[in-house]
Structures are given as structure tokens and as C-alpha cells.
Amino acid sequence: MKDYRQYLDPKVVDKLGRLQLKARLIVEGFLQGAHGSPYRGVSVEFAEHREYTPGDDLRHLDWKLYGRSDRYYIKQYEEETNLRCVVALDVSGSMRFPESFSRYRYGTLVAAAMSFLLLRQRDAAGLALFDSEVRTFIEPLSSPAHLSDIVRGLEKGCGEDRQKTSLLPVFSELAERVHRRSMVIVISDFFAPVSETLQGLARLRSRKNDVILFHLLSPEELTFEFPQQTLFQFIGLEEKGQVTVDPRAVKTEYLEAMSQFRRDLKRGCLKERIDYQLIDTSTSLEVPLTAALARRARKRSRR
Amino acid sequence: MRLAALLNPALAWLALLFLVPLIIHLLNRRRYKRISWAAMDFVLAAYKKKHRRMRVENLLLLLIRCAIPAVLAFAAARPFFGADSPMSMLGESRRNVVVILDVSYSMNRVAGTTTLFESAQSQIQSLVRSLRFDQGEGFTLIALSREPRVLVQGSSSLSDLDRALSRIPRPDYEPADFGLTMDLLVNKVLPELPGVTEVLLFSDFQRRTFERELQGEPGETTAEAVSVRSLLQKLVDQGTSLRFVNLTEGTPTPGNARVVDLRCAEPLVIVHQSVRLTAHVVRQETSAGRGSGFFRIDGKERSIAFEFDKQGEATVEVFESFAEAGDHAVEFHLEDDELADDNAALLRVVAQDSIKLLLVDGDPIGSDPLSGELRVLLPMLDPQYGEAAGDNVHRLFEAQPTAHQEFNRGDVRLDEYQAVVLANVREIDEQRVRELTDYAARGGGVWFFMGDQVRPDSYNQRLYSEGGKGLLPIPLRSEPAGDVPSFRNYSPDAYENWHRLQIVDDLHPAMRESVEESRRQLLRSAAVYRYLGFEDAKLPDSAHVIARFERGQEIAYLDQTIGLGRVLWFSSSADEDWGFLALAAQVFFPFIYDGMSCLVTRDASTHRLRIGDAIRRSVPAAPEPYTITLPGGEKRLIEDLPTTPHLGHFPLQPFTDTRVPGLYQLDVGLGAGEDPIHELFAVNVDPAEGDLGAVLREELTVLMGKIPFDYGLKTAEGSIDDEPRRQGEIWKTLMGALLVLLLLETLLAWRFGAYR
């Protein structure tokens, strides 16, 4: 059987075909790994049977029941069409970093895979692309064909002129546009004032939404390690100025500031009961998918 | 702080390498990689927090990196600091001394049981022994002398010192010259010897040694003093200390006496003729007192006691006659005192048989030579002319008169005479002119007197040669000047118009007796009224004016040197025809006598020399290998002989080894037909060196100006070694500093973040 787990490596899957295909492969890889994964607690539960209709995925055909009944039935998993999820992806200038494999591309894969997974579960998936404001909003729908809309929206988002990140107005707008009690997955680097970010997130939470934060950071941003021992001229994306310095000279202070920023954001998220997940963009896509599904499961169990 | 010197100054240029880290630093600031960065806020925050400190760290690292090559270059250049500099404490000390030893003869003075020279040698040996040769210390020894010289240069061996001192068992017989010695030290020795810490001068600090620097009016600084100061300033600027060790410090004032002169009163000494020998003695104390000594004449001693006058001077005389013609050795010795080297003087006296003269009468009257032109000259020179020689009669001059016709015929042999006088001779045959010229060149003396017979045109044609090569140095005028007075019409006014002689050269031997004022007035009064003068022409170097006429300043009396001989020209007559001179016996006799002495004697100074002067002699014929006998008996055979005559004579090679006072004997054979030459040369010390008056410390301080020096150190044993002055050579300290800098650079670079 083909090993789809390789497609959890963002750099591997990124080279493959269109985004829709990538999303499917990621999810296949994820689901394949889920059986042997440490995230065992996160499983897709069988709910009931329904009669087979052409077009259904034959992998979910219950062959035992066929043997007993001589009729084709599809296993239905725990899915509720009333789970509405919006994946909000930051498309601001800072998401272009790093050039080799940008946060945006990683986020796109996560968003696409999440959408595929949700739609597969018969959840409603939607998409919001934002920078200083919400640029694109695709209403959550549960139709499998909706994936194409989402994918299209994601692909389109790559070419747009990007602005600076401004999260407070974005979250405020999302809070208005997203149905109450939805799940909102925010994928961003969150390079904005923490207080404003938390304020915006609080607004989302005030409408009883479940919020998951995928905080995407590149390994260079996390470690501030550079292979060359030389001066670097750091040119800020989103027109934040430039400075020439040897990274080794300011590494300690930078990491302190970065840690403080993450701590503040995480603390703020905890306070609002928002799931905060730091994602190193060089790591496997399994992490964000697992986190999202775990949250989904907890939400379902509270109902 | 004063930087003494750099032992390897060429390497100091490497210090410019400090620019390399600076350039690298500046270039590195332009080399960076560009990177777009999203988390810019954090980088900016980190930079803001850190940039001031980074600047300080970078600057510190840069300074250290620049300092490293500079310190390395400085260490390689091996700087050292003078003993007075606090920097010398950082260094490895080393003593490198220059010892200057006064070798003038005043150092031979006895002080206590030893001479000053021996005392100096002993102290120098003690000093050199105290040096740490195994640690690179060394010494140089220089002789302070009239001709200073390096005896040992840059040595670390006691045996070098012993060898050098053994070569100078006693001082030179010469004085010393401080300025020349300092010039040798600073300009020749020290450039070869970097790192000299001290210069020690061991001397009696006699005034004579500093004479040239101290001469001048009180308060006036001489050019020589300025020169010496600038030399010594160079020493001090290198961190070298100066120490003057006065060996006479604490010794009593010496009572030294010295012989300053010894001479024979008569220039012409004839056998059996009593001559006066005079020695002049001076002593250190300016007070009257007794003295004693002896004359040694040809080996025979005659003791003599004498009295010093209140000025501490004495004239000691003795009369002596010489039985034989030839050179005689005359010495005068004082009794021994503290300084023996100046207690003697030596003299060569040449005694002659009668001086044979040829007198040529230009206007003879009959056969009686006393009737013609020679009527005054002949009896004056040879009063015994025509008389039979008595047993006890010695004629100073043996005159042989001859008429000009005989002379021009060549009937006389010039070589038989020591001088030839031509009085009023009309003209001279060309062949005789050649003979006369040759005769003069070989040492003969010729004297021309003018008169009414002389034909100037003939003289000018035959005797004058341009450039002083002829007997006549400048042409005669065509006509005589002045008038012969008529004594019947004599008037005092006419007397006033006569021509009086004015001596121009007081020191000329032809005027020896006439320089006294009374004689000078007499000479002046014995005027001439007619003379045959010389044209206004430039005198050649071989000619010399002895006297002029007061009015008009025309040349009256002239001396021309031809080879070894002399030619005198007197522009008036030898008799009373043209003037009163011949009638004034008290003037004319000394005039003639001095002229003759001048013609027949050699310049005495050629045989009276100082230490170091060369013995020079020209001989009339090609010499054979000859000898010079030194005082003490050593004979030197000279085989380097002249083969080409110069102006008719053969100059012998100058003999310069006259370092010891005494009588040197020259014996030269001239081949068949020529008499050999046996002559004495008296070489004396310079008596001025015997003036032991020391330079005062105050005078030395004024001479030295602002240059610091130590003076008057005790000469007790060991005192020179006390608190030796050691320089600081700090290259090892610098290498240590370099290591520290390297470690510091490594540590800081690591601490500040790898190799920024």
C-alpha cells in the first residue's frame, strides 16, 4: 500500500501538483499515520451506515454488512454538518518569509488539508484571507465540491499585493462574519502588537467561537542561527526598516524578545481559552492537523 | 621620558602594519549579506539594546588588533631607554660603556706613587671587569688625543682591553683635543654602537685639552664650544649619560716646571765662535724661586742653577763654541719634577767654517776691490780680507771679490761659495744666468744690489721668467727713480724727499736685527735717494716683500725662493752712491749680516719640529738608500727614493714617525762627487701641554651648557662601579605585552561573539 505519510512533509508535498491534490495527499498521509500515530486519542469515530450512492468513496464500504445483507452500505463517521469551520490565513507581507519555503505556502497546505479533512467529515469549511483587513471570505459550506472554491481562493491569495498585518480589525470583522459557535483556525505569524491581537481574538471568542491559533514561525526566526559568519543586512518585510548587524552579536537579545512575544501571545490565548500551537514551518504537517482535530473532538464532546 | 634609541630602527617601519586590521575592519563593514526578514521588530529591539555596547566592543577589538603589529614592530626594533628614564625599569638592563682615556703627556704627571695615566688604566680595568659580559655588556676604549683613535671597539673581552693598554704603556707625547675626540665618538663610533649607556672620560682635565672650546672672552661662547655641545647633545638624546672622571681631584697643585724654548742666539754659527744658547723655563707657580738643570752639548753636561722671577719664568743661558763644523746636539734638561716629559728641550746647532762669499764688482776701479762697488761691502763682511790667517782668528765670512768681467767669463766656480753677491753688475751672461739659477736651486744664496751700471732691459730679458721661475721675480723698471744729490747744494729739504725704508715683514730672517724700534728708526734714517724699482706686477708665490719705501710704497727689498736657495734683491746700491745706508754702519752691518745669514742658512724650523711633525728634506742630487736614526738608537733604512728632480732638487719621502721626542739623525749619501748629508732634527714636545692648569668645574659647566653630566667622581677604587648606569632594553617586556594582547584579542573575540 502506498505510503502517504511522506506527504506530511511540507517540502515534499509542496512539489506535487495542484493544491487540491496536495490537500488530499496530506490528509491520506495523516489518516494513514493516525493509526500508528501517538495521536491515537484523535480518531474518526464510526457513527452509522447509510446506503451506498454512486460516487461514494468505496474505501468506506462496509463489506461485512454486505456479506450479511447483500446490500451496499457506506460507513458514516462521526460527522456533524453543523460544525462550521473557517480557516483564516494571514496573507500579509511577513508571511512571505522565508523565501525558500514561505510561511504562506505552509499555511496554504495546512488550510487546504484542513478544508479537505473537514469537508470529508461533512463539516462546513470556509476560508478567510487577511492582512490588514479580510481580503477574501468564503462562507463555510459542507459540499465536497466546496473544496475547489477554497483551493481557488487559496491559490488566488498567493498573487495578491500584500499589506501589513493588522489583526484587531481583522478579527473584529471575522467575529461579525463568522457564525456563532464556529471553529476558527487562524494561521499566521502574528507579527503585530500582542495586545491588539488578543483583543481581536477576544472578540472572536465573545461570539462563542472555538479558536485555534497556528503560530507559524520559520526555524531561522526561532533559532536565529545563520550558516555564514558575516554581517547581515536585515531588511524588514512590511516596510519595517533595516539594520546591518552580525546576528551572533544580538542573538541572545533577539531570542529573548521572541520568547517574550510568544509567551505573551500564548498566555493571552490561554486566558481566552484559545488553543495556541507554535508551528515550526520545517516540521511535519501532522502537527497542525492533529491539533485541529483534537479541538474538533473536544468541541463535539461538549455538545 | 626620553626614548634613547632603537637598536634596529629599520624594523620600526613595520609598525605601519597597524593599518592592516584597520583596513580589514573598514572593508568588512562593506561586506554583508542581505536578507529579508519578517520578525524585524525583534531584530530592531535587540539591536537597539545592544548597539552601543557592540560599538565599544568592536572598537576595543580593533584597537587591540591594531596594537598587535605595532607592538611587534616596536619590539623588533629593540628600543631601549636611558638609565634616567622610568621606562628602563621595565627592561632588561645592560651596561654598554665607552671609555675615553686621555693620552696626552700631561697624564704622565706623578700624583702620589703612580702617574695619572697609570691610575686611569687601573680604574678602567676595574670598571671593565665589573661588566657582565655574559649578559651582553661591553665596552669601547677611545684615546683622547690630538689625533683621537679607537683602541677597542664594542668588545666583551678583558683580553682586548689588556692588549690595547699594553700597546700604550705611557701617554703620547702630544696634547689632546676634546672637540676632535667628541667628533670621533659621536659621528664615527656611536653609529656603529647603538645602545651605549655611558661615556666616561678619564682625564686630568687640563685646560689645554679644552683650549679651543674655552678660548674667547668671558661669557662668550666659541664656535668650537657650540659644536661640542651639539655633539654631546646627540649623546644625551640617546639616553647616554656622561661622566667625567677628574683624576686630579683632591691632588695638590703641581709644581711642574717646563722648558718652553731653547735656541741659539746667532743664526750663523762659526766654528770656534762663542755663541749664546738660551733656554726659557716656566713653572706652574707664579712666584720667584730657585731652579736647576743642565745643558748637554754634544754629550757633555754642564749643570746650571738659575732663578725664577716673580712670574715664575726664568731665562737660562750658557755660552759655547764649537770646534768642528757640522751639526751639534744641544739639550737642556730641568731637574725632575711631577711631569718629566716637558723637562727637556732639544736643538740642532749647525756650526760652519767661514762662510765663503763671492762678491762680484759691477763697477771695478783698477784691480783694487776696495775701490770699486765693493768698497763698503768687502771690509764690512770680511775685515781680514787680504791678511794672513792668524791662529786664533776666525773669519765669519771669507769674501772673494771678482770683477764682473771675470764672472761673466765663467772664471769662477760658484759651488765653492755659499753665497754670491752681485753689486751693480751691468748685465750677466746667459750662461752665467743658467749657472746662477742652478746654483740657487741647489741651495746657494744670491744677492743683487742695484746701481747706475745695471741694465734693466738685460736683466728683464735674461733673469726674469714669468711665474717666478727666474732669478728675477718681477721685471725691473726701465729707469731708476730719485736723484743723486749734489752735496755742494745739499739742503735739509732735499733730505726730506729721500726714500726711507719701511719693514713689511718683521719676521723675515733678513730683518732679524732690524725689528727693534731703535734699529727700525736707524734704518729709516739711513735713506736712499736713488733706486731702481720694480714694475707694478703681481708677485709670484715664490717671492716675498721684505721692505718698501715709505713714499709710494714701492718695493725696496725682495726675496725670491729658487729651489733650495734664495735670491735677495735690494733696489739701491751696496755703496753710498745711491744712498746713506752703506754709510750707516750700525744699520748697514746688521742689514748685511742678516741678509747673509738668511742666504747661507736653511730655515731652522725645518730642523726644529714638534711631536708628529714630518722630517722633510730635499737633497741636491739623487740620493742613495739612507737611514734615519731615532732617539734610542733604532735605525730605519729608507729605500723608497726620489728619482725625478723637482725644481733642481730631490725631495726625500717625509718621515712621520716622530712620536718620541729627541734628536733624529738623517744620513744621506748622494753619490760620487757630492758630499753626504748628516743632519740632526730636533723633535720636541709641545711645552704648552706642560701647563697643568686644570679647567675649572664652573668653566666646564658653562661649556656644557644644558647638557647634564657627572663630574669629579672620586678616583677611589670601586667608586666607578657604584650604582652603575644600566639602560632598559624592553623588547622582552614588549613581547610579553604582545602575548597578553593576543590572548586578550582571542578572549574578547570569543566573548563578543566569535571573530567580529
Image (cartoon, coloured by chain):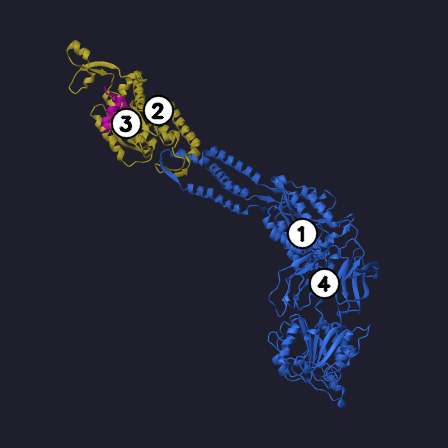
Chain colours: A yellow, B blue
Residue on which disc 3 sits:
A12
Residue on which disc 1 sits:
B143
Which residue occupies the foreground of this view, B741 or A233?
Answer: B741
Residue at 65% x, 76% y is: B436
Residue at 60% x, 74% y is: B467
Question: Which residue is outermost to the bottom?
Answer: B488
Q: Is residue A118 above or below residue A236?
A: above
Of helix, strand and loop, which one carries label 2? strand
* Separation of residues labelled 3 and 2 (CA atoms): 22 Å
Q: Chain of mark 3?
A: A
Of helix, strand and loop, which one carries label 4? strand
Disc 4 crowd rating (10 Å Cα; few below 14, some 14-19, many 20+) is many
The answer to whether any part of residue B566 appears in the image is yes
Callout in the foreground (2, 4): 4
**Whole-percent x, y for residue B441 in the image:** 65, 72
Residue on which disc 4 sits:
B680
